[in-house]
Amino acid sequence: MADAIAVLGCRVRPSGGVLGGAAGRRVRRAIEAYRAGVAPRVVACGGRRWDGVPEADALADALIAGGVPPEAILRERWSVSTAENARYTAALAHGLGLRSVVVVTCDWHLPRAVRCFRAAGFAAVGAGAPSPPGRAALRWPRERASELLELARSAVARRGLR
């Protein structure tokens, strides 16, 4: 059992109060994990605003609509990248003694997301939300570019060149 489930934000397009697309798939996967007893807390991550609504708030509302109790949800409303999801979640969670997380994101995004959460100090494993067929192949170049950018930023930070 983990301390928390971290569901990562992305574009949110509520339709009739229900999230669609990748956000909807991620929320459904997080609800499944919560119901299965994987962790007692869920962190809704994401600070980017879509139509004025932070991703974390849209995700949290969908989690609540899916049966996750409001008191089980933390909202991380500041991040705009995967690395920031991990850092800001760590800032929230470590103060509460939460050290292990199950990261929920799209299956194609999971390897990098788990690495980011481990780098932020978590014992992290992933639970991928299934993507439509062919999506991983379309997203691979973006994921690889993001991974290389994060590695470059880490190298700069380690050398104290900031």
Image (cartoon, rainbow, N blue to C red):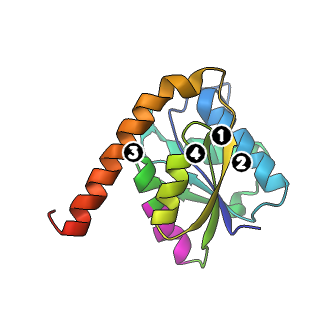
| Residue on which the image places disc 3 | 147
Task: State which mark lies toward you, 2 or 3.
Answer: 3
- Which residue bears the numbered disc 2? 30
Q: Element at badge 2?
A: helix
Residue corresponding to mark 4: 110
Q: Earlier in the sequence, mark 4 or mark 1?
A: 1
In contact (CB < 8 Å): disc 4 and disc 1: no
Magenta part of the chain: 87-95
Crowd band around label 3 with a 10 angstrom C-alpha radius: few (<14), some (14–19), many (20+): some
Disc with the residue nearer the chain's start (2 vs 3) = 2
For the N terminus, give its image quadrant.
bottom right
Q: Where is residue 98 in the image (x, y as percent from the top left)?
A: 61, 73
Q: Which amino acid does label 3 sit on?
A: Glu
In this image, 82 relative to 129: left or right?
Answer: left
Considering only order in the chain, which callout, 3 or 1, is on the residue closer to the N terminus?
1
> Which residue sits at x=14%, y=64%?
161
Dividing the image into 4 quarters, which one contains the C terminus?
A: bottom left
Query: What's the CA distance linking mark 2 and mark 1?
Result: 6 Å
- Sequence-wise, which precedes: disc 4 or disc 3? 4
Does the residue at mark 4 contact the one at mark 3 (Cβ under 8 Å)? no
Describe the element under mark 4 as helix, strand or loop.
helix
Which residue does the image show at 41% across and 37% down from the upper left? 144
Q: CA separation, marks 4 and 1?
A: 11 Å
What residue appears at the point 50 percent right and 71 percent down from the top-left corner? 121
| Callout in the foreground (4, 2) | 4
Q: Is 110 in front, or is 35?
A: 110
